[in-house]
Structures are given as structure tokens and as C-alpha cells.
């Protein structure tokens, strides 16, 4: 079962930018934990900044946002697998 959660949490990001201007996140720190990005999905631009979808090794996915006004990254949304007990 997948749980969707909404946040607006600041994160530390390590990323590269390719020749086409696409952001390629490599890893991010969120809530005192480091996450390695294994897959980068869709990216889009809005008036408030750049949005990037990423996936980590366990299959959880996140929407990350680079704010255009202060150039800070935030974690906006998470799709996480719930453990079945």
C-alpha cells in the first residue's frame, strides 16, 4: 500500500545540471537522514521554481522543489510504501 504525504521541509541537495539544463539529483538529506537517488523522473517549471520527481532504492518517491526566490530545496511530497503488519 502506498501512502502519499505532503510536506514543505527544507533539504540539503547534491545534484548536477546537464547541458540541457535538467537537474540530476544524486542525494538529499532530509530529517537527519541521507537518501541516495536511483532514478530521476519528470521535471517541470512553475512560477515558483523547479520541481523534480526522484526515487530512492526502496522504491519510495519524492517531489523535490527548488525555490526560484531563494534557491533553496524543499521536499514537497512523498509516496512511501507502508509496511503491512
Image (spheres, rainbow, N blue to C red):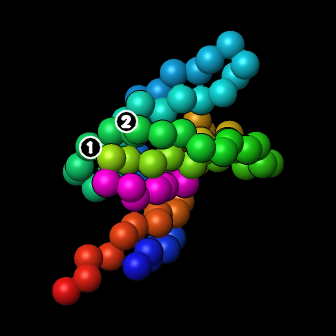
For the question of whether residue 38 can be seen, the reply is yes
N-term-proximal mark, 1 vs 2 = 2
Q: Is residue 31 magenta?
A: no
Q: Residue at x 51, y 21 (%)?
A: 16
Query: Is 60 drawn above or below residue 4 in the view shown?
Result: above
Give me the disc on residue 5. none
The magenta region covers 58-64
Q: Say whether residue 72 is visible.
A: no
- Residue 46 percent location from the top left of the image: 78, 48
Q: Residue placed farthest to the bottom in the image?
A: 85
In the shown orientation, is residue 21 left or right of residue 11?
A: right
Residue at image position (66%, 45%) is 42
- Closer-to-camera residue (19/65): 19
Identify the secondary structure beneath mark 2. Answer: strand
Query: Residue at label 1?
Result: 34
Identify the residue at the far left of this view: 85
The N terminus, quarter of image:
bottom left
Label 1 to label 2, Cα distance in Å?
A: 7 Å
Image x and y of residue 70, in percent = 60, 39
Residue found at x 47% / y 27%? 15
Amino acid at each position: 500500500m502506498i501512502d502519499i504525504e505532503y510536506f514543505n521541509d527544507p533539504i540539503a541537495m547534491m545534484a548536477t545540471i546537464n547541458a540541457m539544463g535538467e537537474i540530476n539529483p544524486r542525494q538529499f538529506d532530509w530529517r537527519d537522514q541521507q537518501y541516495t537517488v536511483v532514478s530521476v523522473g519528470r521535471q517541470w517549471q512553475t512560477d515558483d521554481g523547479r520541481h523534480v520527481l526522484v526515487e530512492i532504492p526502496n522504491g519510495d518517491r519524492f517531489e523535490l522543489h527548488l525555490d526560484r526566490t531563494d534557491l533553496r530545496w524543499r521536499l514537497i511530497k512523498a509516496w512511501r510504501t507502508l509496511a503491512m503488519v
